[in-house]
């Protein structure tokens, strides 16, 4: 039997992602010129990075409980979550893989990131986090459908 999912650990990260999303939504509500010229752009990078870290920390935790599920790269975490049915496979391939790439971009190529691209993420892509969180909540509600348990 695989080790149980640690519900408290996952829920702390879920709550953390939700807090980051709340901040990102506030920043995205600002007019672009204010966002670009004020602290919004820099704050958004920080909150986005933390939200993405939360996604992949949760994903890694879940996969570590699935035989053969371990993954070491963000892209691989996304794909394996789809392969194991934790998230929709198409969502994993089209969204989680890109989220993993963007996390790496924020971490390693931050000097190349533009206010325009961050603002576009705030306007058009925060729902991807909600999709992921919905899948995690569904897993916690019924872990048995994936042969998992929760402690």
Image (tube, helix red, strand yellow):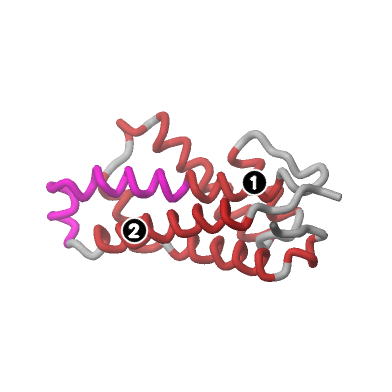
Query: SS at mark 1?
Result: helix
Identify the residue shown where x is 56% and y is 46%. 56
Check residue 61 in the rendering and tell me which mark sits there, or answer none: 1
Q: Is residue 70 left or right of residue 112?
A: right
Q: Nearer the viewer, residue 55 or 61?
A: 61
| Residue occupied by mark 2 | 122
Q: Between marks 1 and 2, how big is the CA–CA gap? A: 26 Å
Residue at 23% in and 47% down: 41
Kindly indicate the quadrant of the structure image that contains residue 131: bottom right
Q: Is residue 32 magenta?
A: yes
Q: Is 88 or 135 nearer to us in this picture?
A: 135
Q: Position of residue 110 (x, y in %)?
A: 34, 33
> Quick check: 7 left or right of 127?
right
Question: Which quadrant does the C terminus fall into?
Answer: bottom right
Q: Which residues are magenta?
A: 31-52
Q: Position of residue 97 (x, y in %)?
A: 58, 47
- Which residue is pictured at 57% across the width and 51% down the height? 9
> Residue 12, image x and y in percent?
50, 54
State which tag comes first along the sequence, 1 or 2.
1
Does 149 appear in magenta?
Answer: no
């Amino acid at each position: 039997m695989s080790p149980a999912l640690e519900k408290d650990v996952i829920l702390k990260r879920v709550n953390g992602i939700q807090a980051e999303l709340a901040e990102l939504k506030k920043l995205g509500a600002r007019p672009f010129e204010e966002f670009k010229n004020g602290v919004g752009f820099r704050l958004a990078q920080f909150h986005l990075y933390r939200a993405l870290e939360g996604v992949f920390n949760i994903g890694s935790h879940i996969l570590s409980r699935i035989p053969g599920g371990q993954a070491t790269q963000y892209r691989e975490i996304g794909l394996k979550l789809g392969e194991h049915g934790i998230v929709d496979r198409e969502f994993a391939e089209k969204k989680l893989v890109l989220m993993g790439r963007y996390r790496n971009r924020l971490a390693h190529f931050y000097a190349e990131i533009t206010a325009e691209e961050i603002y576009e993420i705030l306007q058009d892509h925060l729902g991807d986090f909600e999709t992921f969180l919905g899948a995690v909540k569904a897993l916690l509600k019924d872990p048995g459908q994936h042969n998992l348990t929760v402690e």
